[in-house]
Image (spheres, helix red, strand yellow):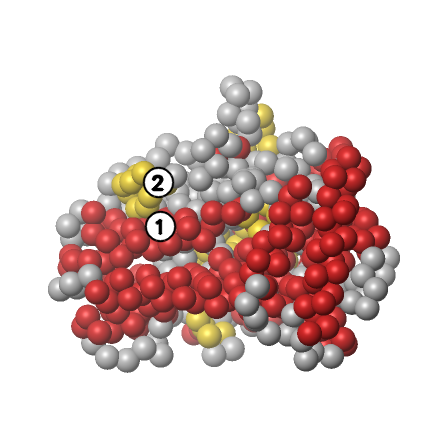
Amino acid sequence: MNDISPQFDNRFRRELPGDPETGVRRREVVAAAWSAVMPTPVATPQLLAHSPEVAALLGFDPATVASQEFADVFGGNALYAGMQPWAANYGGHQFGHWAGQLGDGRAISLGELLANGQRWELQLKGAGPTPYSRGADGRAVLRSSLREFLCSEAMHHLGVPTTRALSLVGTGDTVVRDMFYDGHPQAELGAVVCRVAPSFIRFGTFELPSARGDVGLLRQLVEFCIARDFPELQGSGEALYAQWFAQVCTRTAVMVAHWMRVGFVHGVMNTDNLSIVGLTLDYGPYGWVEDYDPDWTPNTTDAQGRRYRFGTQMQVAYWNLVRLAQALSPLFAEVTPLQAGLDAFRDRYAAQERADLVAKLGLGEFREGDAELMAQFQQLLQDGEMDMTLAFRALAAVNSSAPDVAVLEEAFYSAPARERVLPALSDWLLRHAARVQASAQAPQARHAAMQAANPRYVLRNWLAQQAIDRAEQGDLAGIAELLEVMRHPYDEQPGREAFAGKRPEWARDRAGCSMLSCSS
């Protein structure tokens, strides 16, 4: 691919009003959806890793990916013909409080690429300052960029709706960050990740003009979003807007239900981090639940309030949708259509949760009492300090004719906790076996369904940290190895059992292996 200019169609810039001022001066941007801004060049861009699947999706052949031009473009030093970089303008509620204008402070979209019959927005994260950087440098460090690159792809292969990642480029520059916010900043290796999605529009995109009373821009944004990102919707006016909002609600419900199914915690579910098309967006202080705890959050910034803990992600998503509904209310004569969308969220989430429950426990179909059976198992996981991923995966290997708690042995983190729950867990396994035997599902089909719902491999923070440690020493093999494992999260992978193990003791309290800050 030497000349891809005919394939760019930058509708976001072309059809929505832009900021009349150019450049990176920090400023309030009113009556505009975007600001034109160029990536800031870096010292020596070098491709550290890429996703072959995403490259193929976008039409980049291996020779193109291997070229220095590719590293230059996706490191921020060059553009392909047809690219027209911009930073988007949006607001948001952060930790429950209205934050006003936020915008792309360290993300710069290069353009919308048309490839394989689809539209993909290519966005560099860490490519330098924008008008929305609020005093920051717009850069990103290797550790956070590597985490976003790996997790975007890992989530896709888990079957979770997500943005994708094309490339990870080292910049050859250092970036100063105070990782722990303790007054001890350090110089770290810089990097740029290219993330890919049909749309990067967020809830906060609509909140900002609404908060400013700019109903004209609000309506324009809604109609643009529907036309570009929801072309299947038909109609006009309030009826169309109501269909669209219901779609946003149900897509969000499916996304969050998938998070809960695989034990993923987003960590910073601000309204500016929620995608309007229902994709997991902005991989900051994320994590996977290990010893099961619904109150766990990976975000050190949220350690006290725990607003964004694992067990409340559905409620937070609903709260965010209510904020979006309030922002959209000037376009509606009454709130009934908006409430219908919110009700659709609850209904779709409940249906998805039931379907996931049935699959995870291998029950065949949902019956009365199944929700209680799941709640009891989750309580046992918590009381027994058991690894969520390992415990659910092990259930598929339990013989329903003669259930044996030994099958769950590798999931325990604590011997005393194991002893405390062993009698109750044994009793639960008997009741689960009776429920399984009462279903019409054949054992082989049940086993397959359970394995398809319960991953063997997830991107545990300590696994990512090991890859980061190696990459910071110049060893990139850990990235490729981990990415390859995460391409097949539901398969048994002989020889790669170490990637499926529970958290080692050394990682319990080490920085980057449990909780993380929002700093990057």
Can residue 495 be seen? yes
Q: Amino acid at mark 2?
A: Gly
Q: Nearer the viewer, residue 375 or 337?
A: 375
Q: Which residue in the protein does label 1 denote?
A: 319
Residue 271 percent across, percent down from the top left: 36, 49
Q: Give the side of residue 150 with respect to residue 211, left or right.
A: right
Task: Place residue 119 in its image quadrant.
Answer: bottom left
Q: Which mark is residue 96?
A: 2
Q: Nearer the viewer, residue 518 or 269?
A: 269
Q: Looking at the image, which residue is at 35% across and 35% down?
A: 134
Are discs 2 and 1 less than 8 Å apart at CB?
yes
Residue 364 percent across, percent down from the top left: 64, 74
Q: Looking at the image, which residue is at 81% across and 68% down?
A: 401
Can residue 17 be seen? no
Q: Give the side of residue 159 with respect to residue 395, left or right.
A: left
In whole angstroms, how far apart are the C-alphas of marks 2 and 1? 9 Å
Q: Earlier in the sequence, mark 2 or mark 1?
A: 2
